Image (tube, helix red, strand yellow):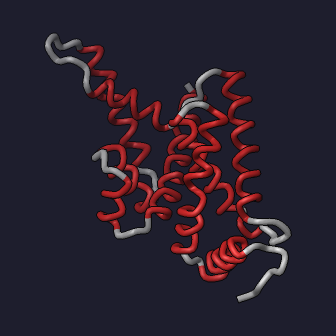
Amino acid sequence: MEVINNLTEKGQRDYQLIQRALEHQDQQAYAELLKHYRDPLYYMMLKMTGDPDDAEDLTIEAFGKAFKSLKLYTPNYAFSTWLFRIATNNCIDFMRKKAKIGPTVNLDDDEKEYQRVVQIPSGTPNPEEEMIKDQKINTMHEYVSRLKPTYRRLIELRYFKEYSYEEIVDELGLPLGTVKAQLFRAREYLHNMLKEKKEKI
């Protein structure tokens, strides 16, 4: 393994993981990087946003952006420095947009709305409410069906069957980091499709 003199022992470890991820598409290397920095990154996002849900989304988003651009990383400085800079810039952009347009729409919002629709009281059937409920359920399933099989399975387990991350790991036999990274991408695809649909209405 190549040794970069200006990096600390931790930096050397991260650099070797990055090389494994890039050269061998080693999913375990990605998972280890996520495991090392997920918690400190989450708490930094929580401190910046003050919202646990936003912090969770921004943490996964930062890893998604970093992993997507991993080939651009250079060992002139620590991976953690590079990752936290990506996360900070992304968080600042998010907060600026949120301040301008109010609460952002994401898959969790659509899913909460979906769940509320499913739980409409049935004591006095209302044809209009039933129609809206059916439309939303059909729309959600229609867009999920367009995803690649891997992403579709993850969305179905996480949102339709309400599996925890740990249960998904057990079900699919994938590392936790891989599950979270792929679920992030699946949510991003769905979000873009839903956003596109709303813009056309």
Tell me: residue 149, above or below residue 157: below
Measuring 76% from the left and 44% from the top, which residue is drawn there?
89
| x and y, in percent, of residue 34 in the image | 56, 62
With 91 as the anchor, is 108 left or right in this view? left
Tell me: residue 42, above or below residue 153: above
| x and y, in percent, of residue 197 in the image | 54, 33
Tell me: residue 201, above or below residue 28: above
Outermost residue, left side: 123
Q: Nearer the viewer, residue 58 or 148?
A: 58
| x and y, in percent, of residue 122 in the image | 17, 18
Query: Which quadrant would residue 169 be assigned to in this image?
Result: bottom left
User: Which quadrant would the N terminus be assigned to in this image?
Assistant: bottom right
Measuring 59% from the left and 66% from the top, which residue is drawn there?
33
Query: Which quadrant would residue 2 be assigned to in this image?
Result: bottom right
Q: Nearer the viewer, residue 14 or 19?
A: 14
Measuring 63% from the left and 36% from the top, which residue is drawn there?
47
Total numbered circles: 0
